[in-house]
Amino acid sequence: MDAERTCIGCRSRDYQASLVRFVARNGSVFFDAHGVEAGRGAWIHPTVQCFESALTRKAFGRALRTTVNITAEAREVFERTLTHIASVPLHQTKAERLMDN
Ligand SMILES: [Zn+2]
């Protein structure tokens, strides 16, 4: 499980284990917690910075090859995802958490 993927937010390559996967469902994006959902996936670092830049660049739609509407709910899901995986020792998320506190 050391395949590399490109983060749709910052465009840097990283190990799959350091990224989270989102898939398109009914025009919105959903967190694929186990990385097993069928279809195209959008890989992104679990950081607010990468999420925001992906939104700015409309990278989700490009990566998923479909029109996706990033709703307030999808943002919430992403933020919950960040909290959920906060135990993973990624320096980016750690910095993010310190800022949030
Ligand atoms: Zn990134």
Image (spheres, rainbow, N blue to C red):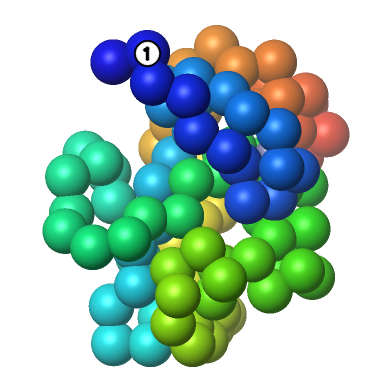
Q: Quadrant of ligand 1?
A: top right
Total marks placed: 1
- Quadrant of res 47: top right
Of the 4 image quadrants, the one containing the C terminus is: top right
User: As drawn, is 51 to the left or to the right of 101?
Assistant: left
Q: Nearer the viewer, residue 77 or 36?
A: 36
The residue that label 1 is drawn on is 2
Image position of 97 (left or right of 43): right
Q: Residue 40 location, x and y as percent?
A: 32, 60
Q: What percent of the width, then of the height, locates residue 23? A: 34, 63
Question: Which residue: 47% across, 24% down?
Answer: 4
- Residue 97 appearing in the image: no
Location of the N terminus by quadrant is top left
- Residue in the image at 21% along x and 39% along y: 34
Nearest the camera: 17 or 48?
Answer: 17
Q: Residue at x 64, y 66 (%)?
A: 59
- With respect to residue 96, does 23 lie above or below? below
Graded by Cα atoms within 10 Å as few (under 14), some (14 to 19) or many (20 or more), the crowding at tag 1 reads few
Mark 1 sits near ligand 1, with its Cβ under 8 Å away = no
* Whether residue 96 can be seen here: yes
Question: Does residue 20 sit above or below 58 in this rendering?
Answer: above
Q: Disc 1 marks which amino acid?
A: Asp
Q: Position of residue 89 (x, y in %)?
A: 55, 12
Name the image quarter holding residue 100: top right
Nearer the observer, 3 or 46: 3
Q: Residue 29 or 67: which is nearer the viewer? A: 67
Element at badge 1?
loop
